[in-house]
């Protein structure tokens, strides 16, 4: 794999914990919001999910690792099979930082969705590559701040489909639904999204940890361009992915990609920046996911990781 040795601040920093990377952002912010989340969750009601695909038509393959399930393993979840745990452990042996990276990416998602709902006035979200349900899923974060928020999730993993049916909820005022579809078919996603979201109103498009599953950078850019072009002015794009700044990450990823799983193609910071071309990139720009509007937590300073993320606004 080609690597760009000039990119990224992460390698020097890893795998140790960097103190002070959050600048002046206060611990109190996260703690105060926790209470709000509890309050909002008590208003969440079970909702029938419209347009669900029949999970039995999409059998689960437990013979090869699956991205959603391995990710769930690194996040400390239990929705995974021996083959996923084995692949996850093997990766950790070579690159222990991957578990922190998964958690940092989830925390980035929370902060970015919060920014969109609270500061950018977004109340509609299209989250592609949803993953298995975990803490602070997009609809929970968004509907805590905006109970009328509308969320459409998209993933192509059969287990994610099964869990979406069982676990997705929405506020009464809002909406949350799930579409079983591939990012590789953006026009299909857009056609379904048009029936569920209002395309006259800005939309937050979330693509976290998924674009690297598209082989070919040009193809990945085309997909993002197709999705972006369909969105109205004022819409926002949230993207993060793993980068190849750290040699151990590259080696672990190469091994994983030979396991039979759908490959994850680590890219450079510059390549990730390319997805935002033509958009107004929101402060603080494209950073490691840890540094993006970083917040201290009650567990201390979050560790630096080998993944970059950012938020762009379409004008
Ligand atoms: C690394 S996980 C990230 C999950 C979630 N976005 C998060 O940040 O926690 C990648 C997710 O992308 C999904 N995925 C992979 N290829 C996909 C595709 N072509 N279309 C839709 N989803 C895909 C996987 O099933 C998995 O749920």
Image: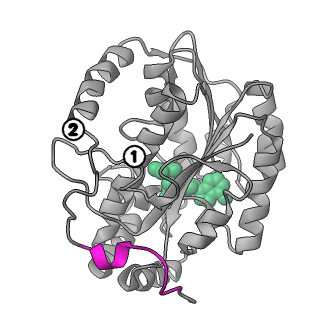
Q: How many marks?
A: 2
| Image mark for residue 27 | 2
Expressed as whole percent of the image width and height from the top left, the position of residue 41 reads: 37, 19
Please tell me which residue is depicted at 21% across the width and 32% down the height of the picture.
Answer: 28
Q: Is mark 2 within 8 Å of ligand 1?
A: no
Q: Residues within 10 Å of mark 1 (few under 14, many from 20)?
A: some
Image coordinates for residue 124, horizontal then vertical, percent: 64, 28
**For residue 15, which numbered disc appears in the image?**
none
Residue 165 colored in magenta in the image: no
Residue 167 left/right relative to 273:
left
Q: Is residue 262 visible?
A: no
* Figure quadrant of residue 25: top left
Residue placed under numbered mark 1 in the picture? 293
Counting from the top left corner in percent of width and height, residue 198 is at: 76, 24
Pick whichever, 64 or 89, lies toward us: 89
Dot 2 lies on which element? helix
- Per the image, label 1 sits on a secondary structure element best described as loop
Confirm whether residue 110 shows in the render: yes
Give the quarter of the figure containing the C terminus: top right
Classify residue 298 by image quadrant: top left
Q: Earlier in the sequence, mark 1 or mark 2?
A: 2
96 above or below 299?
A: below
Which residues, given as a range, are shown in magenta? 4-15
Q: Nearer the viewer, residue 45 or 15?
A: 15
**For the stretch drawn in magenta, what is the main secondary structure?**
loop
Q: Residue at x 67, y 65 (%)?
A: 274
Q: Residue at x 71, y 53 (%)?
A: 182
Name above or below for residue 276 compared with residue 150. Answer: below
């Amino acid at each position: 794999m080609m690597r760009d040795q000039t990119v990224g601040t992460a390698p020097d920093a890893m795998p140790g914990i960097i103190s002070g990377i959050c600048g002046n952002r206060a611990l109190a912010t996260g703690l105060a919001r926790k209470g709000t989340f509890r309050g909002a969750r008590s208003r969440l009601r079970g909702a029938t999910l419209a347009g669900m695909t029949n999970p039995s038509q999409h059998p689960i393959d437990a013979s090869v690792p699956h991205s959603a399930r391995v990710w769930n393993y690194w996040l400390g979840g239990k929705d995974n099979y021996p083959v996923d745990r084995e692949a996850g452990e093997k990766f950790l042996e070579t690159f222990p930082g991957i578990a922190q990276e998964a958690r940092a990416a989830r925390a980035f998602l929370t902060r970015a969705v919060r920014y969109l709902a609270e500061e950018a006035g977004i109340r509609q979200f299209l989250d592609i590559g949803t993953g298995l349900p975990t803490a602070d899923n997009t609809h929970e974060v968004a509907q805590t701040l905006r109970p009328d928020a509308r969320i459409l999730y998209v993933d192509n993993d059969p287990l994610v489909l099964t869990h979406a049916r069982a676990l997705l909820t929405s506020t009464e005022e809002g909406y949350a639904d799930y579409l079983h579809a591939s990012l590789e078919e953006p026009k299909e996603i857009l056609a379904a999204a048009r029936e569920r979201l209002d395309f006259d109103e800005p939309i937050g498009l979330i693509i976290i940890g998924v674009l690297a599953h598209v082989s070919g950078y040009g193809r990945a850019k085309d997909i993002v361009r197709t999705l972006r072009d369909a969105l109205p002015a004022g819409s926002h794009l949230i993207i993060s992915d793993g980068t190849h700044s750290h040699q151990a990450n590259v080696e672990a990823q190469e091994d994983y990609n030979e396991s039979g799983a759908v490959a994850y193609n680590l890219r450079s910071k510059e390549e990730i920046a390319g997805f935002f071309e033509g958009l107004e990139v929101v402060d603080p720009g494209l950073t490691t996911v840890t540094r993006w509007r970083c917040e201290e937590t009650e567990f201390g300073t979050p560790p630096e990781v080998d993944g970059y993320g950012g938020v762009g606004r379409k004008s």
